[in-house]
Amino acid sequence: MRDKLFSDDPALPERRRTGTAAACGTIVRTMTDIDDSAAVNRRPHILRLAAFAAFLFGLFYLVAIARVIDVDDIRGVVAAAGPAAPVAYVVVSAGLGALFVPGPILAAGSGVLFGPVLGTFVTLGATVGTAVTASLIGRRAGRDSARALLGPGRADRLDRQIARGGLWAVVGQRFVPGVSDALASYAFGAFGVPLWQMAVGAFIGSVPRAFVYTALGASISDLSAPLAYTAIGVWCATAIVGAFAAHRGYRSWRRGDRRSGTDQAPEQTAD
């Protein structure tokens, strides 16, 4: 009886269509609100990363170009530390490196103070300290914003690529000439490269250049010495290997990225 009453009501189909349209409109508005909210929420992350990048480039200009820090004065203070001078120079150089004081200048100073052998190990210690310090700051200042801008899918793919090859990415970057190690370490930290990969990768990848610049500093008084020629030869070989490794690494990363996108497409279709 009840079914008959509703079936005989001529306004029932219209009410059903109206109700369905209202429900669809509500869903569309809700999805639009979510998209608008996501778009609005991206703005603080963009501003945060832009402010961090501006700060780093301003610091780079002041320290690496305008040379507001006198490395010679710092070297004199460290030399006065006596037997503790190597440890003091490691700590001071690690901080100065994170402030964009050029690594070759710090390494050459290590060679002047400690000679080519001990100076190379001091330079390596300072290099690892700079990498870890800059990575920590980059992770703290930019990782959450970088992941938010990438989105969950891309961020997860990046995490998998870092877990698979993050160590060798750090090693390869150290071989590429003309790239600021401190700036790269900030970027690695913002993208979530683990600290152990930063430390080990910086140590392995910096051995040739640490020797080169420390040896040149140790032989600054006689650049015609065999040590200076050896250092120059190692630098040339490192530059060639670095260019080749950068090319191979980029091609490998592109292949991995395309493969990840291809693997994800069937999953989205299945969903």
Image (cartoon, rainbow, N blue to C red):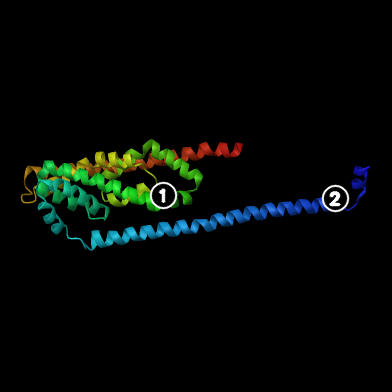
Give left or right: position of 123 versus 15: left
Residue displayed at 48% across by 38% down? 260
Residue displayed at 41% across by 56% down? 49
Other residues around mark 2 within 10 Å, as few (<14) / some (14–19) / many (≥20): few
Q: Residue 264 appears at what percent x and percent y?
A: 53, 38
* Element carrying mark 1: helix
Q: Residue 185 appears at what percent x and percent y?
A: 32, 48
Q: Give the position of the C terminus as an image quadrant.
A: top right
Disc 2 or disc 1, which is closer to the eye?
1
Q: Residue 225 appears at what percent x and percent y?
A: 6, 45
Q: Quadrant of residue 212?
A: top left
Mark seen at residue 18: none
Estimate the spatial distance between the alpha carbons at disc 2 and disc 1, rounded to whole Å. Answer: 54 Å
62 shown above or below 135: below
- Counting every numbered tag in the picture gives 2
Query: In this figure, which residue is indicated by the disc labeled 1?
Result: 143
* Element carrying mark 2: helix
Identity, as a three-letter code, of the amino acid under mark 1: Arg
Q: 161 and 23: which one is in front?
A: 23
Give left or right: position of 40 versus 135: right
Identity, as a three-letter code, of the amino acid under mark 2: Pro
Other residues around mark 1 within 10 Å, as few (<14) / some (14–19) / many (≥20): many
Query: In this figure, which residue is indicated by the disc labeled 2?
Result: 13
Q: Earlier in the sequence, mark 2 or mark 1?
A: 2
Q: 173 and 197: which one is in front?
A: 197
Q: Residue 145 appears at what percent x and percent y?
A: 44, 52
Whether residue 248 is visible, yes or no, is no
